[in-house]
Image (cartoon, grey):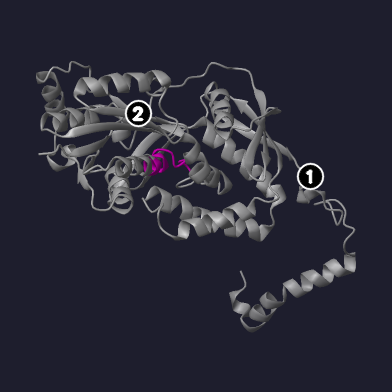
Amino acid sequence: MKQKKVVVAFSGGLDTSYTVMRLAQEGWEVYAACANTGGFSPEQLRTNEKNAYRLGATQYVTLDVTQEYYQKSLRYMIFGNVMRNNCYPISVSSERIFQALAIARYANEIGADAIAHGSTGAGNDQIRFDMTFLVMAPGVEIITLTRDEKLTRQQEVDYLNEHGFEADFAKLKYSYNVGIWGTSICGGEILDPRQGLPEEAYLKHVTQQEERLLSITFERGEIAAVDGVAYDNKVEAIQKIEEIGASYAIGRDCNVGDTIVGIKGRVGFEAAAPKLIIEAHRLLEKSTLSKWQQYWKDQVSQWYGMFLHESQYLEPVMPDIEAMLNSSQRNVSGTAILRLRPFGFDTVGVDSPNDLQKSKLGEYGETQTGWTADEAKGFIKLLSTPLRVYYGIHPDEKR
């Protein structure tokens, strides 16, 4: 009989390493595919390739979707200033969607009979992978050994060792998911809601003590320059901002939120670039967007972030929201200035040709030229009319 093909979403971690070996041992023709959204170093990718073949894979491939991830997700999260619970830049959750899309496309290309991933049954990733595969690769079997068999870490390690794959998969106190839009940290003190993470839990530490200014220039909402240096490649611009911000250990926090399956989840993270970029972008928008542009953009941005987090990226409304976000950025051009210090930063100011503060009609708290004093008094009297009507009828309710 012809061997069946299975594509394993391969990260190089314990669960996916076990999955590759186990399926290869069971007679599958295994294609190990590492979908890179910017979180893997060249060295890690070389190690993944070497280990995939050691584990029994027929073929290994790296699917680089970093630029696609930026174009189809990150830039809209910047446009929308998306922070889940006003705290967490939606990093790992959004990356998983684009990793799943890349895996599904590859599975279709090679005519795979099945797709496998290493998710457990208690987290969000199982939903992000399964839902994407069900839509993008209909009819292809989904295999999840870790979830279906409720495998323990020790069971997987023992299996690998027994079959000749000696690797250090010792249980660490913390687990990390590193990506271009932040690093999530699970385990350790995170499991106790009364505690925060200690210094040693973070991967990036303070190496710069002196305060400095950081300028980020945007053109139509997208990063155009960092400290005056132009960037055509927006991914490289994000990486540069991350390098600068990480040297001050900026972007650390813990987020408590609702998982897709309905339980509460807590995660630590460090995300210098998202925190700096979004706050710089928000600062520029305050000066270049109208009140109602800001208001309605905030409403749809909340939905965009929620849908992205909850595996609804393929919901047909998403392109409609993206169109609104894209339109809202037509005048968001200029430079935002931030002041960085160890563990934090402040917003300083903006320089934009579209700054609505430059209106000649008036300067807040100073002088006005667009109306007279009598017109101001008449406006205020009209504005108070509904209140005067109400309290004229209900004087006893005055505070």
Q: Is residue 112 above or below residue 186?
A: below
* Other-residue count near label 2 (Cα within 10 Å), few / some / many at <14 / 14–19 / ≥20: some
Residue 250: give x, y in percent of width and height.
Answer: 53, 28
Picture quadrant where residue 223 is located:
top right
Q: Is residue 179 left or right of residue 239?
A: left
Residue 127: give x, y in percent of width and height.
Answer: 29, 48
Give the amino acid type for the residue marked by disc 2 in the picture.
Tyr
Please report the residue visible at 51 percent of the width from the left and 39 percent of the height from the top: 70
Q: Is residue 379 above or below residue 331?
A: below
Say which label, 1 or 2, has the lower sequence index: 2
Residue at label 1?
353
Query: In which quadrant is the N terminus drawn?
Result: top left
Q: Is residue 191 left or right of residue 362?
A: left
The front one of 379 and 315 is 315
Picture quadrant where residue 23 is located:
top left
The front one of 249 and 138 is 138
Give the amino acid type for the residue marked by disc 1 in the picture.
Pro
Residue contact between numbered discs 1 and 2, judged by CB atoms under 8 Å: no
Secondary structure found at label 2: strand
Residue 74: give x, y in percent of width and height.
Answer: 51, 42
Q: Distance from label 1 to label 2 (Cα)?
A: 42 Å
Secondary structure found at label 1: loop
The front one of 195 and 106 is 106
Q: Is residue 47 left or right of residue 371?
A: left
Which range of residues does the magenta coloring cover? 87-98
Residue 176: numbered disc: 2
Please report the residue visible at 54 percent of the width from the left and 47 percent of the height from the top: 76
Q: Residue furthest front?
A: 1
In magenta stretch: residue 265: no
Please report the residue visible at 33 percent of the width from the left and 49 percent of the height from the top: 132
